[in-house]
Structure formats: C-alpha cells, structure tokens
Image: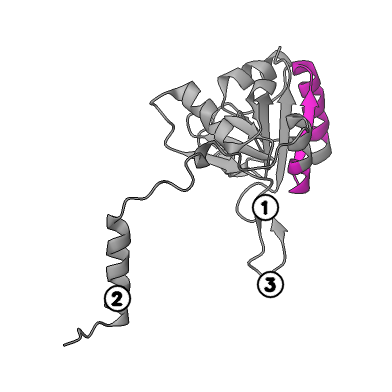
Amino acid sequence: MQENISSKELMLKKIRKALLEKRDNPYPNLEDTPLYSPTEEIPEVLFAEELTAVSGNFIYCENGIEFIENILQLADRFKWRKIYCWEPELQELLAEYEFPFYKTDKDFEQAEVGITLCEALVARNGSVMVSNQNAAGRRLSIFPHHHIVIARTGQMVMDLKDAFKLIKDKYGSQIPSMISTITGPSRTADIEKTLVLGAHGPKELFVFLIEDFS
C-alpha cells in the first residue's frame, strides 16, 4: 500500500535528509573575499565625496589653529551661542584659544551645537562611527541642531570592518554598549515622500579631519 505523504511532509523529509548529508563548503574563502571592488581613490577624498553626497560638510585642517579659524567662521555664519563640548581633550583645545562653550549640560534644552569626538570615519560610505564610551555620551551627537565631529587622520578607514577593528584594538574586551554610524544629517521622507533634514536629530553635520591637534 502506497504511503500517502503530503507535499509539506515530503518537503520536510528532503530538508532532514539534506541536513544529515555532509557536504563541502561551496564558499570556503567567503570571509576573505573583498565585499567591494578595489579602488585607488584616496580614503580622505572618497570620504569627502560620500559625505557631501548625503548633505554633510567636510573640512580638512592641518592643525588646531586652522580648526579654530574654521569653527569661528561657522559660529559667525550660524549665529551660534549655545555650544556644548563635554570631551576633556576638545575642551582643552577650545579653551587654549578662548573659544566659548558649555562644559556641563546647563540649559541643554537650548543647545544649538554639539562638538564631539568619534571612533572612526568610514570612507566607503561617508559615515562617522560613534560610541557611548566617549565623554559626550549619547545626547550630544543627537539633540543639538548642529553636530560637529572632530577626527584625527589616523581614524580614517576604508570600510566598516576596518572601523570595527579600530574599536576592538582600542577597547579590547570592554566593547562599548552602543556603537552607531552617522551618515549625513538626520533625514526622513515619511510625510508625503518629501525629504526633510533634521527631523529626528541634527539638521547639519560638520566633520573636521585634523592632521595635528596641537
């Protein structure tokens, strides 16, 4: 008598049989295979192009003096008054040139600018990798309407995997509880499919790449 097997049972039998059979890995070198095509473009140039394409602003500075000159121009252009910086290293740089800023979260609901460090700059997609391990925490890169990121040239990497390697090398087993990437200003097109910048976070992103902080 022929066994009456449903199509569902037949499919499950085939799956079980396939799981029991040992087969060679058809892609043994998959993890070592490059995800992207090789590029000869300089990472700094690629990052600037990709960041600009998503409405971000890239500014290269050779040293701290150039950074202060550029940030003074931005402050004058946007009429900034409530500028917040909680990173001790950046506070020292700003204080050296007597640039005014808030060291605490006093009147933070009126914050216009947040100045933070980052973990890495990812050239491939123009993204900034941040974590909650720095003194700026989570709020300073999200709440103010303008976000200024300060990075050293050594933090520029080509791909996300390289950025995660920097994180691992820096923190070892103490990986930050929050790691995120910022790709341009906050944006949404939920309302009538119209793109709006600054809907859920900063509407302007400025990334400073500084060769030498001194």
Q: Is residue 70 magenta?
A: yes
Residue that numbered label 1 is attached to: 198
- The location of residue 78, given as percent across then percent down, is 79, 40
Indicate which disc, 1 or 2, sits on the residue closer to the N terminus: 2
In which quadrant of the rendered image does the C terminus lie?
Answer: top right
Report the mark closest to the observer, 3 or 1: 3
Relative depth, front residue between 116 and 16: 16
Q: Is residue 22 left or right of residue 70?
A: left
Helix, strand or loop at mark 1: loop
Marks 3 and 1 sit apart, C-alpha to C-alpha, by 16 Å
Could you say which quadrant of the image residue 58 lies in?
top right
Q: In this picture, which residue range is highlighted in magenta? A: 50-76
Report the mark closest to the observer, 1 or 2: 2
Indicate which disc, 2 or 3, sits on the residue closer to the N terminus: 2
Indicate which disc, 3 or 1, sits on the residue closer to the N terminus: 3
Label 2 neighbour load within 10 Å: few <14, some 14-19, many 20+: few
Image mark for residue 15: none
Helix, strand or loop at mark 3: loop
Is residue 106 among what the camera can see?
A: no
Report the mark closest to the observer, 2 or 3: 2
Relative depth, front residue between 19 and 175: 19
